Structure formats: C-alpha cells, structure tokens
Image (cartoon, rainbow, N blue to C red):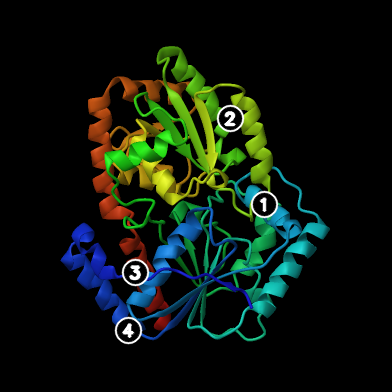
Amino acid sequence: MLERVKTEKKSLDNYQDIIGEEELKKIKELALPLEGEKVIHINSTSFGGGVAEILSALVPLMNDLGLEADWQVIKGSEEFFNVTKILHNGLQGMEVRLTKENKEVFLKYNQLNEQLFEGEYDFVVIHDPQPVAILHYRQEKKGKWIWRFHIDPTNAQENIWKFIKPFIEKYDAAIFTLKEYVKEDLRIKKTAIIPPAIDPLSPKNIELSQEEINNIVTRYNVDTNRPIITQVSRFDPWKDPLGVIDMYREVKKEIKDVQLVLIASMAHDDPEGWEYYEKTARHAGEDGDIFLLSNLKGVGNLEVNAFQRASNVIIQKSLREGFGLVITEALWKGKPVVAANVGGIPLQVDNRRTGYLVGDVKECAERVIYFLQHPDLAQKMGLAGKEYVRKNFLITRLLKDYLNLFNQLLLK
C-alpha cells in the first residue's frame, strides 16, 4: 500500500468568524451533491512544502463536509527523487539533461506506485510531476482523475515538457495556478485555474501573543529589539538564498543592526536541498547576524509563525515561483512583503498596496531599507495585505474551488 497520511479533524464552522456566515453556507451547499463521494489526494511527501500544508487542511475539511477524503504518499528512493528534481528544474526552465536511464527510473517507480495504489475512488487528485505517470499504468480507469500542477512551467525546457505531457493528457482535468501556466499544446478535456491557499487556523497562521513570539525567537539567539528580515523557503537555487544574502549585505550598509533569518524545511523528496544549504552557509560566512534555520533545528510551523510575526519585512526573492504560499502567510500576519516580480507572486503582492515587487538585488535592498525607515507605511501595506488574503487566499476558498470542480466533473 501507499503510505496513508493521518490528518487532524477540522470543522468548517470554526472558520465562520473569519469568512462570514454567508460564505460558509455557500460552501456547504456545494458539498451536498458530493456527500459520500470518495476522494484521494496523492503526492510525494507528507511534510516540507506548500502541497503538504494545503492537504493537511483540505483533506479534513472535505471529510467534515461529508465526502470520504484520503491522502496518500508515494514511495521512492533517492535515485527516483534525484530524477524528479531534474524534471522539476527542467519544467521551471533550468537547462538539465534527462537521460534514457533517468526516464526508466521515473517510469519504474510510477509503475511500482500504481501497483501499491489500492481502492476505488470517485475523484483521484495527483499532485505534481512525481506521480504523474501512475494513471498511465492503470489497467482500468475508474472515477475522475485530476492532475494538480503547483509550479510555473512557462519557461519549461521543451524535452522535459514533451516527456511528461502525454501522461497529463490521460487525465480528465488539470489544475493550474494561473491561466498563463497552461501550455498551448496541452490537449486535455478540462483545465481549472485554482490558486493555492493557507489555513488561517493552522499552527503556522494562528494568532500569537507578543510574549510567545519573543520566547520562540530569542531561543534561536535572534534579537527581537533589532530589525529582522526573513525569507521562508527551501534551500533551492530557485528561491535564490544567495541573492537574499547579497541583498541583506546591501541593507546592512545603511542599517547596521539589521538581522537576516533564512528558514527552510528539509524534505526527503528534495535531495538537492542539502547541497544548496551548504552553499548558502558558505556564502553567509561567519556573519553572526545571518541565521540559517530549519526543521532539523526544531523550527516547525509554530516557530515559522513566530519568526514571521517578529519580522519587520518578509522577503521572497525567487527566480521562479509557482505561487509562494509563504507570501500569503506573511500578508495574513499583516507584514510588508518585498518579493520578486515572477510567476504567481504578483497574484498576491499588489505592487505599492500590499508590498513591493522587485527585480534585482539592488532594487530589493532599496525597498527593504524604505520599509525599515518608514514603519507606518509598512504597517499600512501589511494591513491591506491581510484583507486581500482574507478575500482571496484562505483554505475555505480553495475548498470551494475543488467542490465546484468535482461537481462539474460529475456532470460529464
């Protein structure tokens, strides 16, 4: 069997104070025709990254509404995840080489996971490229199969796209974050545009007292009385941690007591993360005001929450970004954001209203300095960002979008 992920129970009613009674009622009405329908979400990891965080809230909320929802994780070796990282990088535009042997490894593990996949479901939702070929090996396709793509493929390397495209086209529907992410040559019955979302009631996003924030942050020797810049992202070339350090050094010339915190989740399906962590650590050098933190140092969701709330400015200096849930998290906490003008980021950062969109290191540093020198403006933009998230990027809206899609597929 595939590994089943246990999730904590959630009640949609607990979100009423956040989204309002009317919205709650609409979601429940959408769920009525789907009562008893069996749903499974399949991805490559149960922790470390936005997909796992989304599913830990989405699955129990579907169950609360009367669907029978499950979440399972595929099996794979380091060899397999090295290949899927090649695919991931190639789909985001990096020049990579996919060998015949790489393809064989990828297909071998997808075939293996198809054999481990048990049970029949009304809706099967496969997340990202790692398990995309499971359907290819299915003898008999039962239920509706949906592929959910979380990254930005607009600059995908052609040979990588050509390799996975035939597998996607076997699905009944595909979900993308932006309409610009749907490749022109993709032939599939239905596409849906559904941006990701955050759970405002998760440990990563719940309200914290100032005392709780200070206790957590000072435990890692970060001084809450001095300015803090934070980026929460995997150690990954696409998140540009080296560029973030260069930006911080520019800011340091102007604001001497500033500190930089880089927080990452080290996930088992990202072997490249270790290599890039070491590269980042070397780039940071002996600077005592740069803090590289991860789940391996006890930094979990609650700690990320505290660091985001303690920060004066949140950074997301990605070179490619499908969406960037960490930006939504920061905005929900009323924090000003300086982020790269790429991928799904402009969907969240309304330039000059909820934060600043930037290009290079120099521009990023200038905007960070401006926020640090104008705290009233930073607060105003942060509050605008929180309301923007309330209307557009909470888990209840994502749940509603999935229910809409399921209902549409039932009619076909």
Residue 33 tag number: 4
Give the labeled residue for mark 1. 85
Q: Indicate which disc, 2 or 4, sits on the residue closer to the N terminus.
A: 4
Q: CA distance from mark 2 to mark 4?
A: 50 Å
Badge 1 marks a residue whose secondary structure is: helix
Q: Position of residue 238 (x, y in %)?
A: 58, 40
Amino acid found under the numbered disc labelled 1: Lys
- Density class for disc 4 (Cα within 10 Å; few <14, some 14-19, many ≥20) is some
Amino acid found under the numbered disc labelled 4: Pro
Amino acid found under the numbered disc labelled 2: Leu
348 or 14, which lies in front?
A: 14
Residue 254 tag number: none
Q: Position of residue 76 (x, y in %)?
A: 69, 64
Badge 3 marks a residue whose secondary structure is: loop
Residue 10 tag number: 3
- Density class for disc 1 (Cα within 10 Å; few <14, some 14-19, many ≥20) is some
**At x 22% / y 33%, what residue is drawn?**
380
Q: CA distance from mark 1 to mark 2?
A: 20 Å
Q: Indicate which disc, 4 or 3, sits on the residue closer to the N terminus.
A: 3
Q: Quadrant of the C terminus?
A: bottom left
